[in-house]
Image (tube, grey):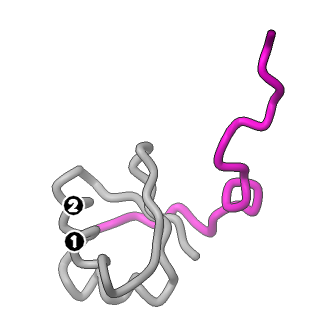
Amino acid sequence: MILIRFADSQMEKRALGYLAGRFSGKTWTTGETLVPEEALPHLAAEGITFSVAGRLPYERAYAPLRDSSPASV
């Protein structure tokens, strides 16, 4: 899986619309999107511009979905 970023929110919306139903992935509010490597040439062929940030670090891919620290009482 490859982590990519889009130049602006319009390009991101266009890309997400294209990716939906074709490829699996994940997006974050930071503007980063995780896609399979196979999706990159398809995005480029559609004229969607993006920059590649690299492979997703293991720690981030498998980080817990919630804070596992104990609650203060």
Q: Secondary structure at mark 1?
A: helix
Query: Disc 1 vs disc 2: Cβ atoms closer than 8 Å?
Result: yes
Q: Quadrant of residue 29?
A: top left
- The N terminus: image quadrant: bottom right
Query: On screen, 22 above or below 33?
Result: below
> Where is residue 70 drawn, in percent x and y?
83, 26
Q: Residue at x 52, y 65 (%)?
A: 3
Query: Looking at numbered disc 2 in the image, what kind of residue is underneath it?
Result: Lys
| Residue 13, numbered label | 2
Q: Secondary structure at mark 2?
A: helix
Q: Which residues are magenta?
A: 49-73
**Residue with the most extreme top position:** 73
Query: On screen, 47 above or below 13?
Result: below
| Residue 5, numbered label | none
> Where is residue 53 drawn, in percent x and y?
52, 61
Q: Which residue is mark 1?
A: 17
> Where is residue 44 drawn, in percent x and y?
28, 82
Q: Seen in the image, is 37 located left or right of residue 71?
A: left
Predominant SS along the magenta part:
loop
